[in-house]
Each structure stands twice: as structure tokens, then as C-alpha cells.
Image (cartoon, rainbow, N blue to C red):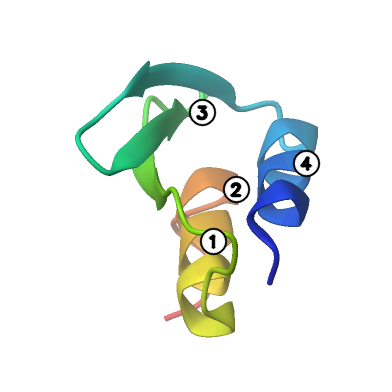
Amino acid sequence: MKRIELIKEIEALGCIFVRHGGKHDWYRNPNTGISQPVARHREIKDRMAKHILKMLGNPSSGS
């Protein structure tokens, strides 16, 4: 998945950019308080993108 597409989906969930890390940007869901790093690569592996979206969207759903 392209990083820009992932960021759009993260922001569509209502998440906000928190800060720049060493090699990642951090986004937080203000409703749940959960933060997740997003690597600064052009491509993010689909499995990792799915995990990030799951954690930021609704971490209690799924396995």
C-alpha cells in the first residue's frame, strides 16, 4: 500500500498526527488514545498497513 493512501485512511478514521520519530511518524486516535507509528517508506506492506488501521480504528475488534 502506498504510504500516502495509508495516511488518508488513517486521517479518515479521525486520527491526528502527533510527532516525527526517528524513522516513523506517529498518529493517535483521540477517541481511544492509542498511538501507532507509520514508517516513512513510499510503500508499506499490506499486512502492516492492515495492522495499523486495525489498531487505530478499533483495537478490540478481530484477533
Residue 50 in the figure: left or right of residue 37: right
Mark 4 residue element: helix
Judge whether 49 appears above or below 55 on screen.
below
- Residue drawn at 33 percent across, 42 percent down: 24
Residue beneath disc 4: 8
Disc number lying in front (4 or 1): 4
Q: Are marks 4 and 2 in contact (CB under 8 Å)?
A: no
The residue located at (35%, 18%) in the rendering is 19
**Residue 11 in picture, x, y percent from top left:** 71, 32
Amino acid type at mark 3: Asn
| Vertical comparison of 46 with 51: above or below | below
Callouts 3 and 2 close, C-beta under 8 Å: yes
Residues at marks 3 and 1 touching, judged by CB atoms closer than 8 Å: no
Q: Nearer the viewer, mark 4 or mark 3?
A: 4
- Marks 4/2: CA–CA distance: 13 Å
Residue type, numbered disc 1: Lys
Relative vertical location of residue 14 with respect to residue 39 in this rendering, above or below: above
* Horizontal and vertical percent position of residue 15: 60, 27
* Residue that carries the numbered disc 3 in the rendered image: 29
Residue at the spot 68% in from the left edge and 54% down from the top edge: 6
**Is the C terminus in the top left, top right, bottom left or bottom right quadrant?**
bottom left
User: In the visual, does 19 lie left or right of 11?
Assistant: left
The image quarter in which residue 10 lies: top right
Q: Amino acid at mark 2?
A: Gly
Q: Residue extending furthest left?
A: 22
Q: Separation of disc 3 and disc 1 at Cα?
A: 11 Å
Label 1 near label 2: C-beta < 8 Å? yes
Residue hosting label 1: 54
Tell me if residue 30 can be seen. no
Amino acid under label 4? Lys
Of pointers 3 and 1, the one earlier in the residue sequence: 3
Element under disc 1 = helix
